Amino acid sequence: MRYEIQGTVLPTLEVYLSNGEAIYTESGGMAWMKGNIEMTTNTKGGLMKGLGRALAGESLFMTTYTSRDPEALIVFTPEAPGKVIDVRLEAGQSLICQKDAFMCAQDSVEMKMHFRKKLGAGFFGGEGFILQQITGPGFAFLEIPGEVREYALQVGETMRVDPGHIACFEPTVHYDITTVKGLTNVLFGGEGLFLATLTGPGRIWLQSLPLSNLAAKLAKYMPAKSG
């Protein structure tokens, strides 16, 4: 399999599959394709795994696209302006991602629900208790609104983040929630009462445009419903 990410604000992911190679995405995730490509739609792993993925922001059903030509083309596009991240995962290697981050992956990659066990992180962490976990081996592709910055945290090194800006992180990174200190900061600082703390070791990916922020901004310009 080879692929190309084209464009900037609204990129496309172009995947070229050899005969027998497969890639899967949520139902309706494909934009266009060329060649003899076989489509198979099911819950991929059974009903319970499908329900778990649905809770994590994806569809209950997944569609697998398998090439029956020496080379076939299939194209995926993100649902919002932002970036497409390509990740190569080794066997057993995982990433924890925000809801709706999963775009598509090779058939060997598993995508499932990740449950945040800490009460505070679930209630005040910006994304709730349910996240996504992708596990290799294989290539996976994520769609992240806005620009993306990657940081490598050393052991004990901490980044404090507005929770909505967390795109994904490695499982070795410790995630927690802290309160903003100072009444004036809480009332007038504009960051709310809680910040997320990400403590290394491990890599983290942060996004510049949480969709919740964009939705709140656009809501000001939406006409009010009458009646």
Image: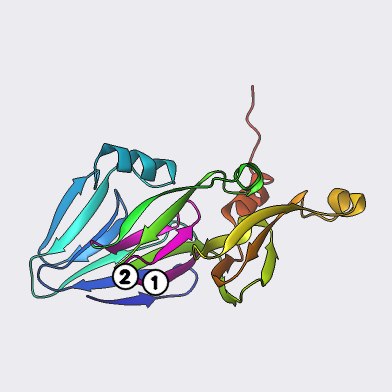
Number of numbered discs overlaid on the protein picture: 2
Disc assigned to residue 87: 1
Left or right, 122 with reference to 183: left
Magenta-span inclusion, residue 98: yes
Measured as percent of width and height from the top left, residue 81 is found at 50, 63
The kind of residue on which mark 1 rests is: Val
| Colour approach in the figure | rainbow
**The quadrant where residue 225 appears:** top right
Q: Is residue 81 visible?
A: no
Q: Which residues are magenta?
A: 82-107
- Cα separation, mark 2 vs mark 1, equals 6 Å
Query: Circle 2 sits on which residue?
Result: 139
What secondary structure prevails in the magenta region?
A: strand
Q: Is residue 58 visible?
A: yes
Label 2 close to label 1 by CB (< 8 Å): yes
Which residue corresponds to the image point at 33% horizontal and 72% vertical from the top-left?
Answer: 90
**The quadrant where residue 76 appears:** bottom left
